[in-house]
Amino acid sequence: MKLPDIDLDQLKEQKKRNFLDRLDFIDKYAEWIKKKNNKKWSSEQKKIIDHPT
Amino acid sequence: MDIRFSGKSIELKKELNSLDSFVINFTDILNKLDINYVVVSGYVSILFGRSRNSEDIDLIIEEMDIDKFTELWNALCKDFECIITDSIKDAYNSYLCNKNAIRFSFKGEFIPNMEVKFPFTELDKWVLDNKIKVALNKKSFYISPIELQISYKLFLGSEKDIEDARFLYKLFFERLDLDLLDKFNQKLKIRDNLLRYLE
């Protein structure tokens, strides 16, 4: 089996981008929580914690 | 988000997840025994909605003698079990008094578990003295001030910790004591390359 050429700098750049994307998601998620009532956001959170896919 | 702040307390109602229920069950025993404690670290973010799970919850309890600890152990062991050791003396002498944590889970389970330790650093002692009371669906327990959590999570510095810090900062920005946050950032020597993650 021929393995791909791996560019570690490219992977590091991808890791950095993923992290920044998650931070951007967290900003949007925090804003969403602020706007929603507690029942809405907490039932969504419960799905993640109690029934992870 | 419907949340009520008043002085050193926060009132919140939410649909409880299994971590919330675990914390309520555990801290209920500490409350009944009048033990000084504070929940710190990741669960503080999760309490307020952070969309991630955790296998453990960090808790600092006041230092106590072996008799008081035995009373606590016996009360906990009705519903929980220590997954580190089954010996009270070992838990007290080899772990807690030796600056190590012990962990309790619901009987027969392993996660989630409560990681319990005595205060070791000056920061541990400060947070015990300056804890915030949370009334969650009319059950009460104590957590660290949010400002310290933000700063401490930046200090820890993993991607998950930075995300926790940013979540709390963005969620509570209008409520934060920015002067206190700045003081903690200075004390913990949080550098600009980490502080930029809050903006």
Image: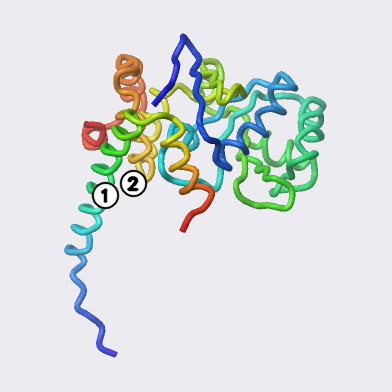
Amino acid type of disc 2? Glu
Image quadrant in which you'd find residue B97: top right
Residue at image mark 2: B159
Disc 2 + disc 1, Cβ < 8 Å: yes
The residue lying furthest to the bottom in this view is A1
Element type at mark 1: helix
Q: Position of residue B24 (x, y in %)?
A: 63, 31
**Residue type for callout 1:** Phe
Left or right of B13, for residue B173: left
- The quadrant of the rendering that contains the N terminus of chain B is top left
Q: Vertically, is B103 above or below B122?
A: below
Seen in the image, is B32 located left or right of residue B50?
Answer: right
Q: Position of residue B179 (x, y in %)?
A: 31, 14
Residue at position x 21%, y 66% in the image: A8
Residue at 56% from the left image edge and 23% from the top image edge: B142
The residue that mark 1 highlights is: A19
Q: Height in image: A43 above or below B135?
A: below
Q: Quadrant of residue B38?
A: top right
